[in-house]
Amino acid sequence: MGKKAWKLLCCLLIYVPLLVSSQDLVKSKIADKKLRICVVEGTGLYKKGAQNCPTLEAKSDIECVYGVDRLDCLRKIQKGTAHFGVFSPEDLLAARWIGAEILVTSELRFHNEFFEYQIVAVVDNEAHINTARELKGSKFCHPGHQIQNHWTEVLADYFETKLVPRECEDDLSPTESRIKAVANFFGPSCKAGPWVSDPEEDRILKNKYPSLCQLCYNPYQCGIGDKHWGRRGPLYCLTSGAGEVAWVRLDDVKSHFGFSGLPPEADPAGYSFLCPDGHLQPLDTRKPCVWLAKPWPSVAAQRNVAAKVQETVAGLNHDDVSSWQNALLMILETYHVNVTTLDNTIPVDDYLDQAEGFQDAYSFPSCNPPRSILFCTKSLIELAKCSWLQEVASVYGVEPNIQCMRADTQDSCLKNVQHKVSDVVIVDQDTRLRAESEYNLKPILYEYSSTLEDKYVVVAVIRAASNFKSGFDLRGKKACFPHYGGAAYLSVFESLMNHTHLIDECTDISSYFSSRSCNWHSQSKCSDVYNGEEGAMRCLLEGNGDVAFISYETYKKFKGNELGLTKQHNPSDFTLFCPFTKPLKAKAVCYLNWVSRGHVMISRTASELREKEIYNSLREIDRLLGKKHRVTTVPFTLYGEFDRKRNVIFRDNTESLRGRTEMYRDKNAGWLDTMYSKIAHKNCTHSKATTARSSGAVFLNAILVLIYFWF
């Protein structure tokens, strides 16, 4: 099945029932004559909805509906819970595949041009480049990468994408294949900024294709902030005498060459516009030829209320700061804008087609066969979020892009990744050991949170009246674990290995605790009510255990009466216990280990090339859509609610995706990671003699420990 057909099928499966059921809802909402605007609060301190919605709702027939992100607003409009909102042109691109019945009514402009900006190619006349075919071997000045709001990666690379055919070599990633093709087509160039998300691989690529950094002001760094990087960077590269062709915004050309009232920084007579059809134009021409235009942000609405929305937002101003018109304009704009009414309400495709080259830029060819990263999801809501993520990542030029599939169970996903039916699955801290040992998977990235509370932190909980002094006092006692082989189990396993020397990876903690413990081995006979985090705590509360090893989050909920387990038990009767080590700071949390709550798993047999592709694509998605973005509102929330559901695919409190090296930099000691692989891939083939010697050694160690504590 083709990619577009697959997307359409997914969309139909997920959204058609919602759309059908929403038809009456839409009609009733229109009938009540109230318009609903979808508001995205954004990440800054100023909350425009909270500040302006009370005035808007009190003084007009417009109500506020809050969205998590801009595409959440699009879904709300599609379902009928909102009528209109503000969208970027990239949002509208991402909306096409669901066939959203919305019309563009107005533009939010901050100058009088028809487009937010236009992009042109400028050549040095002395280079004697008269047609696009003569660019082969020319010195290229590229704006660079990660320029934030001013460019997307797709727009920055459009010029080279149009000129340079891609090869899609099997032994190169799509990113390197494109870089190689550009390096072979152009001569010395400047293409500063990160080429890939991994700094080590970025340096390897820049050493491998040094010609693409040769014209940068600092060729070795070839990074963000270079004099030839950014919006004006290509012009400095061109007019300094280094470059021969620059890919740059038209408004920056006018400013640089003195056509906007500022003194010129170079003589415009020495340069020309290179047009897509192959001819040249002087820079002082009245109608420059452009390769690409970016539309303005716009107001889009449901088809059947679009005319009413257009009339409502027309002529909004800030003249009366206490008026509903001022409140609505404050909600619509991210900075002062002019709301420009279109001649007619217009479908999304027709609106975007007005911008030269814009839709073409986002229709770049992919490799055949596709190199997409296939994400395995375990529910319809996960598939829905993944499908939206797929479209957004494609719009923003992430390559290889992701595709999504659904399996019935997590085990099915693990098996799919094992057999390379899919590439990626995310598991929690209690499933990872099984993913490694039974399905031969390995982690490539980790969901990271900086606060201790948002990690999975393993703590030991005992009755406050207990006489336990150290972990050695737990020998032979009843222990309660949430899961056999989970993070708490492995944390205790590692602590006993490191501190008692009574067990190793080829033995088991079952030899340390009472046989009446819960979830201490695979054949645990405890009641199902003692499974999981709350179950392990209940096991301790009801006297079936002497110690419970659970997460710090669960312990805090118990102490805060959030688990519903405190009716017959006083939280003050239970406390944390430090089995072997005490925290250095007096009020620090006493814990055994911590581990990430989400692990991005791939096949252990994946090639090094495939591993790099997956790593860089997911890190780029994290950079664009994670919590470290620098824009006021995001098109899509990677870590946060999706359709009013929490922890879909990723946990809401995740801050970023990190690799293993970055995880070790965390300020909190005790990261439990190597224990998973150590247990999953242990080699415990012993002869009887070896086993006997090991047993004797363990027995001798036990005697020595007892002697030490008795005397």
Image: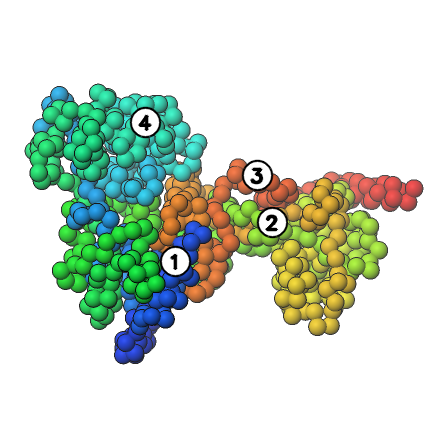
Q: Residue at x 77, y 44 (%)?
A: 500
Q: Where is residue 317 in the image (x, y as percent from the top left)?
A: 26, 58
Q: Is mark 1 on a helix, strand or loop?
A: helix
The label shown at residue 227 is 4
Residue type marked 1: Lys
Disc 2 target residue: 452
Disc 3 target residue: 664
Which of the two discs, 2 and 1, labels the residue nearer the N terminus? Answer: 1
Of circles 3 and 4, the one toward us is: 4
Quadrant location of the N terminus in the rendered image: bottom left
Residue type marked 4: Lys
Residue at the far right in the pictured view: 711
Q: Residue at x 63, y 66 (%)?
A: 562
Q: Do the residues labelled 2 and 3 touch (CB within 8 Å)?
A: no
Q: Position of residue 580 (x, y in %)?
A: 76, 45
Residue type marked 3: Tyr
Q: What element carries label 4?
A: loop
Which of the two discs, 1 and 3, labels the residue nearer the N terminus? Answer: 1
Task: Give the alpha-carbon distance from disc 1 to disc 3, as whole Å.
Answer: 39 Å
Task: Give the alpha-carbon distance from disc 1 to disc 4, as whole Å.
Answer: 37 Å
Task: Give the alpha-carbon distance from disc 2 to disc 3, as whole Å.
Answer: 14 Å
Q: Residue at x 40, y 38 (%)?
A: 197
Q: Position of residue 117 (x, y in %)?
A: 21, 43
Would you call the spot at circle 1 few (<14 residues within 10 Å), some (14-19), or many (20 or more)? Answer: many
Of circles 2 and 1, the one toward us is: 1
Of circles 1 and 4, the one toward us is: 1
* Front-lying residue, 25 or 85: 85
Disc 1 target residue: 48
Residue type marked 2: Leu
